[in-house]
Amino acid sequence: MNTGLLCYCRAGFEPELAGELTDRAAEAGLGAYARTERGSGHVLLLGEDAGAMSRVLPFASLIFARQKLRLLAELPGLDPKDRITPLMEALAGAGRHGELVVETPDTDEAKPLAGLARAFGNALRPALRQRGFLSAQDDARLPRLHVCLLAGDHLLVAQGEANDSSPWPMGVPRLRMLHDAPSRSALKLDEAILTLLDAKERESLLREGMWAADLGAAPGGWSWILARRRIRVYAIDNGPLADTAMATGLIEHHRADGFSWQPPRMLDWMVCDMVEQPRRVAARMAEWFANGWCRRAIFNLKLPMKKRWQETRLCLDLFEQQAGRPLTIRARQLYHDREEITVYAG
């Protein structure tokens, strides 16, 4: 039986996630190998010691993973008339779970399986409770049981710890685009705040009356997200800002280049979604910290088409080396990102 980790990712970024997982496992002295197919939306990291792999690869530290789960079993070649019996056999010794999540990878090919996933979940849930594998009511204190449908006859069975996995099915937060948002890019910062900061940090680090700068702000989506939290924003861009952004009364538009503008004093936040070479952006972000212009930042790094994992490591190392002071750094490829990663530093 395969043991290891099951991680979901954005379709097309399987090589980057596989590289991240195998490089970091090797650096920790663990023998592990990745198995995946491009476009599959998931990666299996397989090895003899799944527990050790999970410990050295905490979910909060992973960049290209939307979800991290401990693989319990892979069940290929199932009889569609009875998927439940072999699944029950695979769960022997796996303990009790507080919630069942039946899902698919987030790919176009898997979308037709969504109806089957719902129906199978409805049939599986009472069977699991009858056998004692699932609590009578959802219990967040217990591990979650995840069943991933790769095909009608091919399942992955995995376990998610509440403090070491994403709380959302498929690892995708469901955010609503508000009608007056200046652009869809507003969802990126909304998701970054939800994903890269915990609840306590969101409350203490994003307070009314703070000051921020938004570099490359036009049309104002990121500035608007901060203004909705009653944070005052210097919006830096030679381009125009949307009327809905300016209508907040908390955004001050400066027609200037984000690579040259300097704040009048230290700010609480700097955010940046400029379209530029990632190394140049990383160096500019480090300059802000080295000069003491901001306390915290959230910024995007647009990745090249090739060697994206290698470029990610290089840019994050460059940023950390040039920032001039110790920082907490978290990075993730968000659901609303495309060819980019989002970084929090503070």
Image (tube, rainbow, N blue to C red):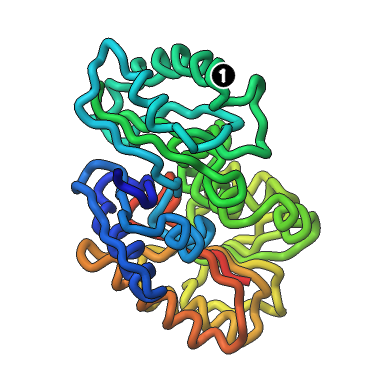
Instruction: From the image, tell me which residue sits under label 1.
Output: 129
The residue lying at 63 percent from left, 64 percent from top is 234
**Between 335 and 293, which is closer to the camera in this rendering?**
335
Give the vertical position of 198 relative to 147 (above or below).
below
The residue lying at 30 percent from left, 49 percent from top is 43
Q: Dot 1: within a 10 Å radius of its alpha carbon, few (fewer than 14), some, or many (20 or more) residues?
A: some
Residue 227 is situated, as x and y percent measured from the top left of the image, at 68, 51
State left or right for residue 250 relative to residue 62.
Answer: right
Residue 272 visible here = no
Residue 346 visible here = yes
State left or right for residue 209 relative to residue 83.
Answer: right
Which of the 4 quarters of the picture holds residue 139?
A: top right
The number of callouts visible is 1
Give the vertical position of 24 relative to 150 (above or below).
below
Residue 295 is situated, as x and y percent measured from the top left of the image, at 68, 74
State left or right for residue 153 relative to residue 136.
Answer: left
Give the vertical position of 203 relative to 267 (above or below).
above
Which of the 4 quarters of the picture holds residue 39?
A: top left
Residue 346 is situated, as x and y percent measured from the top left of the image, at 63, 71
Which of the 4 quarters of the picture holds residue 170?
A: top left
**Between 309 and 294, which is closer to the camera in this rendering?**
309
The residue lying at 54 percent from left, 27 percent from top is 133
Residue 300 is situated, as x and y percent measured from the top left of the image, at 45, 62
**Between 328 and 276, which is closer to the camera in this rendering?**
328
Give the vertical position of 28 relative to 306 (above or below).
below
Q: Secondary structure at mark 1?
A: helix
Q: Which residue type carries mark 1?
A: Arg
Q: Residue reaching furthest right?
A: 209
The residue lying at 41 percent from left, 25 percent from top is 88
Name the quarter where the N terminus is drawn. top left
